[in-house]
Amino acid sequence: MDSHAPPLRTRDSIPAKAGVGLRFRHHQEVLEARPAAAWFEVHTENYLGGGSAPACLDAIRRDYPVSLHGTGLSLGSAEGLDPAHLARVRELVERAQPGLVSEHLSFSVAAGNYLADLLPLPMTEEALASVCRNVTQVQDHLKRRMLVENPSTYLQFRHSTIPEWEFLAEVARHTGCGILCDVNNIYVSACNHGWRASAYLAALPPEAVGEIHLAGHSVRRIDETRTLRIDDHGSHVAAEVWALYAEALARFGPVPTLIEWDTDVPPLVVLLEEAGHAAALIEEAESGSRRALAA
Amino acid sequence: MEVAAPSLLELQRALRASLLTHDDRGISAHVVDAGMTPAERLDVYRNTFASVLTTALRLSYPAAHRLVGAEFFEGAARVFIETSLPRSACLDDYGDEFPGFLAGFEPVSSLAYLADVARLEWAVCRALHAPDAEPLDAQRLVALAEAERARVSFAPHPSVNLLRVDHPADLIWRAVLEEDDSALSAIDPCARPVWLLIERLPTGVEVRRMTQSAWRFTSALCAGRPLAAALDEARDFDAPVLLADHLAAGRFIDFSLNKRALNFP
């Protein structure tokens, strides 16, 4: 089989509907019950070996569109990408034929070590050049367009000169990549740094936004007066984030939307309910744009 | 005081040092401190860094985790992380040095079997995540001439792992994971060598005990020793029967022909 053959569009593309982040504890249930989920997204790094995990993914892939979401490519690394890791990602992309492939606007590798987190980048011209170089290398290697996601951040660097939203738009413009707009991350970072979340959304080029992420976050109390929002993917999507999501849909139109839940993962039905809430908002946005067209 | 902006590489290495050793000297001057100090902000990343890697170790070493208890395991993991960072973004690959670390970790020196249990757990992890590979079709061996067959060197399946430990790590491991306290208390944990074969089957990872001679024969084959040489050295048991079992179980995926039958090429 020619592994570079174009995938069947109907089976492989991610629909502009609400999907669910698939975690190990739900594999069996999905395989047996075939729930009515529009699509699933998995973490790339959990499927890079052999054995039962990728075999399960193969089986799920036969019935659902699947997206691969990575945490390990380290798009912001000044020292460049790890070619061995990139090669393993490509193998999985060829095997799973995902509808979307995404990564983060962050770095996680320094001095050859993986630092197990999505670490913040200085928003500088130098970092922009590094990210663009690395994104281009990934897209060339995978022979496909990727999406880059805005992270939640807890610190900013003094020497940053470019607002994050402009930085992300520039990466998309320079490399042709798409944007994975994580609405929860925008909200978390906006609260933590005093940005205006709506202005962030308004600065993103709508045509580049290929996916939206939604998740829960927590509020950590630092002391009597100060709090910090932490993107822990361990609860329901917050009301303020749903409101921001409705704004995003109004700007970008219906976009594939994912519910992420990674800590204290609840029963699958809870995730499907969250996805149902997103689906209702997508439908509202669709009828809104139809009304606008008819007017 | 104005500090010169660091290069991206300098900044990333300084953040690495801050996560790893809590040394913020290279980074804190570059962090905006509005409302929170740089150290408070860096603590968020330090927490994630340490907890993600500790979780990765706990998932790879569940029996060791239960043997020493959650609190102790976490403390040991934090010490280990300072000396051994992941070299790959695939965390299934992280922790190969943990058994060796435990072997030299003074606070657990009274648990002589702990490092062996961890060695077994690492072999189980390797088997679990090893690449998939098609087993060798035994017909390809049948098609060889007798003299050629003697020169066969096998390539083992990536999930096959042979381990020799000094304690009954397999019994301890099984009893701990099955939470079988009566089995655990019946085990004599004293040092005596055990020879193990670890492999991934369609049903999951299997850990089997072998006799010393069967293990040696299997190890020789997996190391690529020519078939005739391995058979020649295996005198006190029925090696051809074991070889047939290995082939039927798919423990080899390929072979090559050595120049000579009896020695390493």
Image: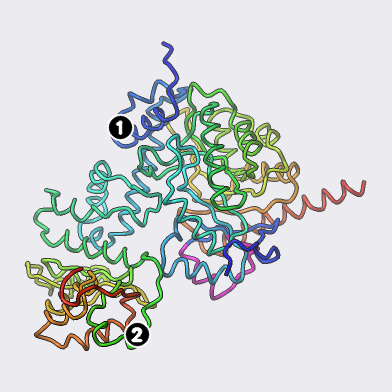
Mark 2, Cα crowd under 10 Å, few <14 / some 14-19 / many 20+, is some
Which label's residue is closer to the chain start, 1 or 2?
Answer: 1
Mark 1, Cα crowd under 10 Å, few <14 / some 14-19 / many 20+, is some
Query: Picture coordinates of residue B224 (x, y %)?
Result: 24, 71
Query: Picture coordinates of residue A230 (x, y %)?
Result: 48, 40
Q: Which residue does the image show at 49% across and 70% down from the upper left?
A: A56
Q: Which residue appears farthest toward the top when viewing the image? A: B1
Amino acid identity at mark 1: His
Can you tell which quarter of the image residue A14 is in? bottom right
Amino acid identity at mark 2: Ala
| Circle 1 or circle 2, nearest the eye | 2
Can you tell which quarter of the image residue A64 is in? bottom right
- Judged left or right of residue A162, residue B213 is left
Q: Which residue appears farthest toward the right when viewing the image? A: A295
Magenta-colored stretch includes residue B69: no
Q: Which residue is mark 2?
A: B138
Query: Picture coordinates of residue A51 (x, y %)?
Result: 41, 69
Q: Which residues are magenta?
A: A24-40
Which chain does the numbered disc 2 sit on? B
Q: Secondary structure at mark 1?
A: loop
Query: Picture coordinates of residue A74 (x, y %)?
Result: 47, 42
Q: Which mark is residue A150?
A: none
Q: Which residue does the image show at 27% across and 86% down from the upper left?
A: B244
Q: Which residue does the image show at 54% across and 61% down from the upper left?
A: A94
Q: Which residue is mark 1?
A: B22
The quarter of the rendered structure image containing the C terminus of chain B is bottom left
Q: How many marks?
A: 2
Question: How is the rendered protein coloured?
Answer: rainbow
